[in-house]
Amino acid sequence: MSTISGAAQKTPYVGRKKGIRDIPETIRKGYRMAPGQLRFCVIAAVVLILALLVVMIIAGNRAANGVAINEEAQVLQDAVRAERIVAVDGNTIQFAEKPVYDGNGKRLILTEKIVTSKSYWVTMSPESEIAEYEKVIGEGRFIQVDNFGNNSLWITMATEKEMNKCIAAVEGSGLVQLNNMANLDWLNRGTDEENKKAADAFANIEFIQFEKLGTTSIRLRRGTEGEISEAENTWGHYRLLRIIAILLLFAAAGAYAYTLKSGKMQKKPAGTLKAVRAVILAVGAVILALTVFLTIQMDNTQDRLIRQGPMIMAADGEEAADGEVEGEDSDQKFNYVDTKKAERTVTIPKTVAGTGTHRTIQYIAIALLGIIAFALVYFFRYERDLGFPTFNVIILIILMLITVYPVLNTLATSFNDGTDALRGGIGVLPRKFSMKSYDNILSKDEIFDAAWVSASKTVIITVINLFLTGMLSFALSRKEYVLRKFITTVMVLTMYVNAGLIPTYLLISRTLNLAHTYWVYIIPTMLSCFNMIVIRTYITGLPDALVESARIDGAGDLRVYWRIIFPLCTPVLATVALFVAVGSWNSWFDTRLYNAGQRDPKTLQYLLQMKILTAGQNANAANTSADALKVSSKTEPITIRAAITVVSTVPILVVYPFLQKYFVTGMALGSVKG
């Protein structure tokens, strides 16, 4: 029977060797660690786990970003090699330097949903018949895909009305709408050999769908709705299976720890104990391999979603020199002229290398996390009551990261280029740094005027509310005040039974005539019943002897409050001040109700709220001029919203640390009677 050695159970240390340098010897001889050693090992283990998690996340994000950029570059390269592409305004345009299709490889046909009245049509016809069609709908409308002798494969984009005119003009026309094509019956004009060649050519046509997205970009999609939905479902299944595998891995680690630390297991025969541990380790290795495999499958499915899903083509309004392609290591810009004779460019992004390396690093980090989980269980096998504190620390750190991530993500999005942000996938750092969103928000003087209104009213409301609410709370806390119960009941009743929005609006705007004035922010918020209850409860918890001794010395109620009660109420007053300041700073609906006129004093939050609501409208209007296009190409509603969130939140984040030490104390002491 194998049990923990008597020395390991009785002797906690190895002689005098209790330092960090003696950790290897302590582990080798199987003794319990000294407190300093244990503290060092736990911190090192937590740091190592967090470092591996960060490496895994960053490597995965960079690999996915590389796939997105490479695929976007490939799609746009394919589009450039086609004869036509769809412009931002929904019209078909041609590049100044148009590559010539040589008939080899896949032929790219671009379909789009920006102009819903037009769709692509295909026909197998001789050139003479196409000439008849073009007499009806205009010359140069048909693109020749391939020539098969007497007949050719042609593509055109036209409305259904135009096609009906063509069909009426040419008897037996074989024009078929591309999106509604169910079979190849339209191949009825040529010989069997020509039809076979045409069918093969049609099979080599690759379709890319364009949809307008945002202000200055076009979304490219290679996959159909069904393909994208199927890939999303597959990714969700792999994700669920991976979560189950991770839970099973934790269960295996727990079972392994049980065999090492449980007294019942130590009584088992040595052979049985070794066999059980070997089986658990083997099962853990299989589950870990399964976790890595499922992660690989998730990434492959995600890459397929990236290739089938939206791609962003930037139309940034910048001029490219003679439409030439720049160096291979830089972004490629293709020059074209839109229907309004304005110079535009389409940018093909740089390709990104190292995607495979990032994936490998990600999978190695996942494997090391699983191995370290079992190694730490074995490493701390002789330490008592270590599991719960370690588990507690890890869970709290994970919760902290979950809480901080949205804040960092919003900050990164606000500093990111608008068009690039539409691609998604932004983590805690901007992918393409830009200050355009903040320039857009802070470019007008009215923003600074509104910021002054918000800041001044926040300070005034906080001071007046604390002054009046504090004095009222002290008065209602005195037992000798005969009306305190009645007044308290009436005030508390207003918290549950109030007139509602319309009577409040009529009272403030009609009866008190406060609308369209600065005082509408101050007077209705001078007193708070909830804050009164919190402060009063705190004051009643203070010793009555303090007030009685002050009265014996001749102090009146006002002096008792300012010299004794007020200093002792610092924690609860700081807490209430934070409540009032945050509520006043974030309020915007009062401006919407009472001060929405052109010359009324407006708060910063109201103007920012209006910017959020009108961001998309302003962005669309920016397409009307080339100069506006250059500005809006760097901003989008998604980055505007993030920047607005940062601007409106930063002042509170700056103030909160100074009041944090009072916050918990004030809430705890103000909630129950001491």
Image (spheres, rainbow, N blue to C red):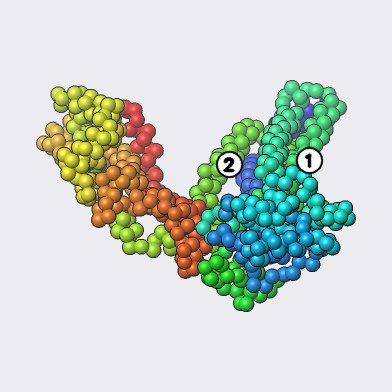
Type of amino acid under label 2 = Ile
Number of residues whose C-alpha sits closer than 10 Å to that of mark 1, classed few (under 14), some (14–19) or many (20 or more): some
Residue shown at 61% from the left, 65% from the top: 93
Q: Is residue 346 visible?
A: yes
Tell me what residue is drawn at x 47 percent, y 57 percent. Answer: 620
Mark number, residue 330:
none
Q: Amino acid at mark 1?
A: Ala
Which secondary structure, mark 2?
Answer: helix
Helix, strand or loop under label 1: helix
| Whole-percent x, y for residue 259 in the image | 75, 28
Answer left or right for 565 relative to 217.
left
- Seen as rendered, the residue at the extreme left is 554
Q: Image check: 442 left or right of 222?
A: left
Q: Is residue 433 left or right of residue 264?
A: left
Name the residue located 59 percent from the left edge and 57 percent from the top edge: 218
Q: Quadrant of residue 584?
A: top left
Which residue appears farthest toward the bottom when viewing the image?
322
**Which residue is pictured at 83% across the width and 62% down the height?**
150
Residue 75 in view in this figure: no
Give the camera-side residue of 622 and 291: 622
Whole-number angstrom distance, CA of label 2 to CA of label 1:
24 Å
Q: Is residue 373 above or below residue 360?
A: above
Residue 398's label in the rendered image is: 2
